[in-house]
Every structure is written in structure tokens, then in C-alpha cells.
């Protein structure tokens, strides 16, 4: 084995040992990418391709979110490397979903965001999803109801109520993304949230939250007190009528 090959082999071994000792603490972004690339080509020197990937896509997140075809335009990155990157993404999504499905989420908007951010962050259009929960706030089902334009999604309360009755859900959490990256709710977001709360309360189903996912941040209607505000408004209107 040449001196160069021995050097690469030693570097790969040290990188793996460093990860096994302390996780990703102390890793530079290019080293994280390098480690991911070695999953697909364990005997290849992946330092230079990792640095090229970061130079092109700017950040670790940019590399992870890049299209497979774009990644393979980088010298030294092939189908096996793409497999390693996509595998770690899907394992992360599965782990977050399993963890979320086993925990109460009534007071865990961060848990919902952590899981669904991986699902929705790459969406170019608005996607509206609903989590259906039982009386103990355990998740029964997750369902997508619309994939709209970049600006809006068509959401039909009747379809959501029908699904809630089919799953025997006691409460709901609404989630949608803002492809612009800004999670601040629009007037339309506020109106549809109010409309949905009014509709499901007639069926004695509770809305726990509506979470809008943006660029690595989110807006929670529950955290901001808006869910309670709309519920109170509904009860007042109901008494007046």
C-alpha cells in the first residue's frame, strides 16, 4: 500500500473514532459531509469531494438538501455516496417520527416541528397536514390534505372532520409550510385556523395547535394564545345564537 493510501486510511479511521467517542461535537461541516460520503465509498479519500460540496452548496444543510443529480456533478461523488446521504436522512426521519408517535404532543410544538421540518422543508408548494390524536394525546394518524400553490392551499373542513371521525380522533394538530421561509401567519392562515376550530368544535373535537413551518423556525398558534382566543370566540358566538 502506498504512503498516500496509508495516510487516507489513517485519516478515515481517526475520523470514525472521533465520531464514536463524542458524536459530531467538534466536527467541522466538511468533516460531517466527509463522514457521510465514506458510508458509500469507505476506501476512497472523501475530504476533497466534501470540501467541494460545501463550496458549491454553501452549508451543511445545503449539501443535505441538494438534488442527487447536482451532488453527482461534484468530482468524487457517485451513486454510492448519494445512497449514504439519503439513508441517513431517511433514518433520521423515521427516528423522529417513531419518537413523536410515542410521546404526548399537546405541549410539544418543538417535537412536531423537529419531525415535520425534515418532511416539509424541501417542499416548493404549500402542504397542509393534520395529526390525529386520541384522548391521551397519542398520535393515531398523519395525513396530507392538500398541496397547493406557493401562496395558498385549499383546505376543506368537511374532509378533515370525516377523517377525524374515521380515526376516532379526540383532537387535531394542523401543520403547513411556508416555502418563502417566513413562518409568520398570513390573514388567510388565521382565517382558515379559526374556521377549522369552529367546524371541529361542533363535533366536540379539539384543536391543539396549528404550526407553520418556515426556514429552520416555526410559528405555533397555541404558543401565541390564538387557539384559545378562537375557541373563546366560538363559545361566545354559540351562546349569542
Image: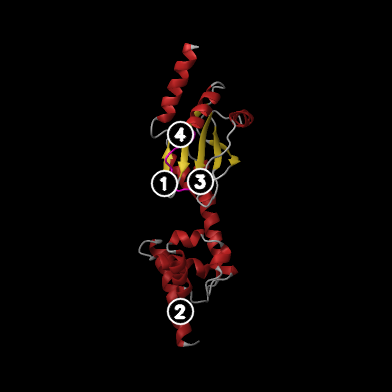
Residue ID for mark 3: 116
Residue ID for mark 2: 8
Answer whether labels 1 and 2 touch (C-beta < 8 Å). no
Measured in 3D between alpha carbons, the distance from the residue under mark 4 to the one under mark 3, in whole angstroms, is: 23 Å
Residue ID for mark 4: 187
Measured in 3D between alpha carbons, the distance from the residue under mark 4 to the one under mark 1, in whole angstroms, is: 19 Å
What is the span of residues highlighted in magenta in the rendered image? 178-188
In the image, residue 70 lies at what x, y percent?
A: 55, 66
Secondary structure character of the magenta stretch overall:
loop
- Residue 124 is left or right of residue 28, and the answer is right
In the image, residue 170 lies at what x, y percent?
A: 54, 28
User: Mark 4 or mark 1: which is in front?
Assistant: 4
Measured in 3D between alpha carbons, the distance from the residue under mark 1 to the one under mark 3, in whole angstroms, is: 12 Å
Which element is circle 2 on? helix
Measured in 3D between alpha carbons, the distance from the residue under mark 1 to the one under mark 2, in whole angstroms, is: 39 Å
User: Mark 1 or mark 3: which is in front?
Assistant: 1
Mark positioned earlier in the residue sequence (1 or 3): 3
Amino acid at each position: 500500500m502506498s504512503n498516500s493510501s496509508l495516510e487516507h486510511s489513517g485519516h478515515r479511521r481517526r475520523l470514525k473514532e472521533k465520531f464514536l467517542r463524542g458524536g459530531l461535537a467538534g466536527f467541522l461541516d466538511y468533516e460531517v459531509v466527509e463522514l457521510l460520503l465514506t458510508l458509500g465509498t469507505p476506501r476512497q479519500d472523501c475530504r476533497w469531494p466534501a470540501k467541494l460540496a460545501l463550496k458549491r452548496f454553501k452549508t451543511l444543510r445545503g449539501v443535505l438538501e441538494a438534488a442527487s443529480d447536482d451532488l453527482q456533478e461534484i468530482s468524487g461523488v457517485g451513486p454510492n455516496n448519494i445512497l449514504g446521504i439519503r439513508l441517513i436522512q431517511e433514518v433520521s426521519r423515521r427516528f423522529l417520527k417513531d419518537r413523536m408517535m410515542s410521546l404526548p404532543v399537546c405541549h410539544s410544538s418543538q417535537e412536531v416541528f423537529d419531525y415535520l421540518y425534515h418532511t416539509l422543508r424541501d417542499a416548493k408548494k404549500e402542504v397542509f397536514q393534520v395529526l390525529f390524536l386520541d384522548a391521551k394525546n397519542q398520535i393515531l394518524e398523519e395525513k396530507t390534505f392538500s398541496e397547493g400553490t406557493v401562496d395558498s392551499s385549499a383546505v376543506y373542513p368537511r374532509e378533515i372532520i370525516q377523517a377525524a371521525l374515521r380515526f376516532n380522533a379526540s383532537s387535531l394538530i394542523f401543520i403547513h409550510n411556508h416555502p418563502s421561509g417566513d413562518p409568520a401567519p398570513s390573514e388567510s392562515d388565521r382565517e382558515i385556523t379559526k374556521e377549522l376550530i369552529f367546524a371541529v368544535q361542533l363535533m366536540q373535537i379539539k384543536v391543539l395547535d396549528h404550526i407553520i413551518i418556515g426556514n429552520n423556525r416555526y410559528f405555533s398558534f397555541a404558543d401565541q394564545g390564538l387557539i384559545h382566543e378562537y375557541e373563546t370566540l366560538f363559545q361566545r358566538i354559540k351562546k349569542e345564537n
